[in-house]
Image (cartoon, rainbow, N blue to C red):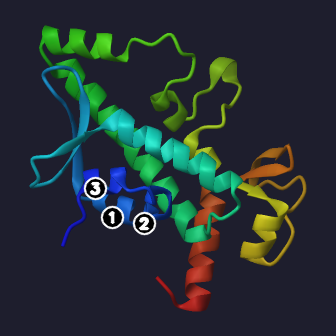
Amino acid sequence: MTIALRELLNDPNFSYRLDEVRNVLDKTQASVTFWGTRVVRVNGDNTSVILDRLAKKVVETSIQRSFSHDLILSDRIAGLDITNTLQGFYKMTDQEKDRACFLTKLFVYFRELSFAVVTTRKYIEGFKPDGISFAGCSVDFRYFCNSDYKKQFNCDLPENDDNAEQSSLNSWTIIKESVIRDLWEKSHINTGTD
């Protein structure tokens, strides 16, 4: 049985079901409605969810789980995959919007008109005002404090390491996505788990 995306989105335990969310998103596509709403639809299903609502839930999850110190490596990988998928959905719907009729373009413009400096989309995409990196969603899935790092990799966070994009941010370090994926692969091979 396929879990409905809307069911997952409304689940109070959404933040602990990242692997399921990633699997469902692998079977989805994004589009723009005539009325200018960006939606995500599971292939073969008539129901849809609003892309910004899904992205907001992922952003909230990334913050909550990072700072509660319970993000295990597989959840970090799932979160990074979900973030990359959402970034792709925004790009895909931008292209669709560009090909849409004038009215749809106008509806999108008014729907997305915001005076906020950082919107959910900008957060997902890793907003960089004036070249200063903003802690985007994928970054939150990459935050490690020394105790989390030690628990998962059985060693201290390296100081001044090339694997860290940003040195300590209030005792947190941002580890490059490629390094996290390599560590995941190594732990997978060593344990023989999925």
Q: Is the residue 187 above or below the residue 106 in the image?
A: below
Q: Residue at x 66, y 62 (%)?
A: 179
- Image quadrant for the N terminus? bottom left
Q: Residue at x 22, y 13 (%)?
A: 107
- Which residue has dot 1 on it? 23
Q: Residue at x 57, y 49 (%)?
A: 62
- Mark closer to the observer (1, 3): 3
At label 3, the amino acid type is Glu
- Which residue has dot 2 on it? 19
Along the horizontal axis of the image, is 125 left or right of 149? left
Quarter-of-image position of residue 178: bottom right
The CA span between labels 2 and 1 is 6 Å
Mark 2 Cα shell of 10 Å, populated few (<14), some (14-19), many (≥20): some
- Mark closer to the observer (2, 3): 3
In the displayed image of the protein, which residue is found farthest to the front? Answer: 12
| Mark 3 residue element | helix
Q: Is the residue 18 above or below the residue 141 in the image?
A: below
At label 1, the amino acid type is Asn
| Callouts 2 and 1 close, C-beta under 8 Å | yes
| Mark 1 residue element | helix
Quarter-of-image position of residue 22: bottom left
Residue 176 seen in the current view: no
Q: Is the residue 21 above or below the residue 110 in the image?
A: below
Along the horizontal axis of the image, is 41 left or right of 194? left
Among the two numbered marks 1 and 3 on one chain, the one whose residue lies closer to the N terminus: 3
Residue 43 % position (x, y)? 14, 54
Residue 40 seen in the current view: yes
- Which residue has dot 3 on it? 7
Along the horizontal axis of the image, is 38 left or right of 90? left
Quarter-of-image position of residue 7: bottom left
